[in-house]
Image (spheres, helix red, strand yellow):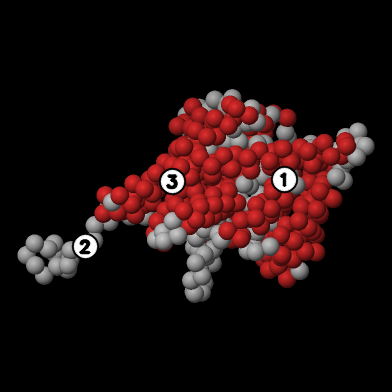
Amino acid sequence: MSAESPAGVSGTPSPDPFAQVRTRGYIGLLVMAAVLGVPISAGAYGFLALVDELQPWTYTDLPKALGFQETPAWWPLPLLAVAGLLVAMTIRYLPGTGGHKPAEGLSTAGAPKPLELPGILLAAVATLGLGAVLGPEAPLIMLGSGVAVWVVRLLKPDVQPQGEAVVGAAGSFAAVSTLFGSPITGAFLLMEVSGIGGPMLGIVLVPGLLAAGIGSLVFVGLDNWTGLGTYSLAIQDVPHANSPTGAEFGWALVIGFAAALAGTGIRRLALLLQPRVERHRVPATVLMGLAIAGLAIAYAEGSGKAATEVLYSGQSALGPLLANSADYTAGTLTLLVACKGLAYCVSLSSFRGGPIFPAMFLGAAGGIALSHLPWLSLTSAFAMGIGAMSVAMLRLPLTSVLLATLLLGAQSLTVMPLVIVTVVVAYVVTLRLSPPPTSEPETGAREDSPSA
């Protein structure tokens, strides 16, 4: 060991982790990330606009075009049966598997091949547009990274694997740039899902943040130009939240523990159903679609509310649910949580989409239901429910705190201490309830990791 070497370190100089940042190639990556951010975010905007148009068209406009005065109570049955058939046929006959399996969590392990992109797109549109209980974030992440890597390979066939990974991450950032209300939330999500850290964290994230920032500008510009909407997670007119009380910190423990139990149950049942669906892909997925429809009909008949509250991801329903919370009894909210939770579980096992927004909606509805009990305010319960259920399903604590607080605007700082306690409790209990990862050989996917 040389005299100049620190104790415990070999005399061989360690490589500079930031050397890549000083190269011209890294500047080129930044430029490429900025350029790719424009078409990818525009494509993501179009994808979200398509799904947003499909939902009312298939549920409301199509029945009227067929001669019904209003949507029949049984309408979810054929709608979800068609969704199941389309998703199953896509998974079975198109290259790839229609995207990652949502019951196994989010994954950022490698960009999909170009031939797999049509299947991912078709499975996602059928899932999200026809009523299955999943969100758009997972297919957008895969489509964004896949398109980015495909374009880079066309323009620069000799691109190195590390550069390809950075560009793929930038494509994912651009695709979800404002989906969660802020590019920063999307950055935390992708950071925790990928599990990257150390000096490489900044090197990989900077191009992604640049692409996300440009993507946000594209979303705003397209909104102003088309008038279709921002398709960004946001809630208006959040009720005032008072400073946390000792009783509410007690409720934080209860909500965190309950969400961990509920999330673990949903995920385990989905993973139990998944191989059974895969053995008989087409008929089983159609059957699962009918089960989702039956749950939506049962909720509508039992509560007098719309069946659509059980269907779809719940992203656009969070604001109305909070604004109209006085119109829901505790019994109605309990029925909603039960029916949507089961529909979410079935969707995870059979369809293709993301797990985030249904988890947020379930947590929100459960929190509002608990706010009918003493010493728990509405806004605090709403935020704690979202954070706890998000981390129970995603196992991403930092992202879950951001998801539960940033969308509350000015009230976020007030409720954040309660959300942090709830998320920590739910996260620890969820990990304690989960079996240890199996020692299977690496296949490139991170499906058994805690963040998967």
Q: Is residue 57 above or below residue 28?
A: above
User: Disc 3 residue type?
Assistant: Ala
Read off the residue under disc 1: 129
Q: Is residue 67 above or below residue 96?
A: above
Provide residue 384's location: percent of width, then percent of height: 54, 40
Read off the residue under disc 2: 14
The answer to whether residue 421 of the structure is visible from this angle is: no
Provide residue 107's location: percent of width, then percent of height: 53, 57
> Which comes sooner in the sequence, label 2 or label 1?
2
Question: What's the distance in space between the residues labelled 1 and 3, CA to CA?
Answer: 30 Å
**Which disc is residue 184 wearing?**
none
Residue at 80% in and 40% down:
59
Provide residue 148's location: percent of width, then percent of height: 50, 51
Question: What's the distance in space between the residues labelled 2 and 3, CA to CA?
Answer: 29 Å
Q: Is residue 404 left or right of residue 196?
A: right
> Which comes sooner in the sequence, label 1 or label 3?
3
> Which comes sooner in the sequence, label 2 or label 3?
2
Q: Is residue 304 left or right of residue 389?
A: right
Q: In the image, which is nearer the foreground, mark 2 or mark 3?
A: 3
Q: Is residue 280 left or right of residue 429?
A: right
Disc 2 packing (10 Å; few <14; some 14–19; many ≥20): few
**Which disc is residue 33 wearing?**
3
Disc 1 packing (10 Å; few <14; some 14–19; many ≥20): many
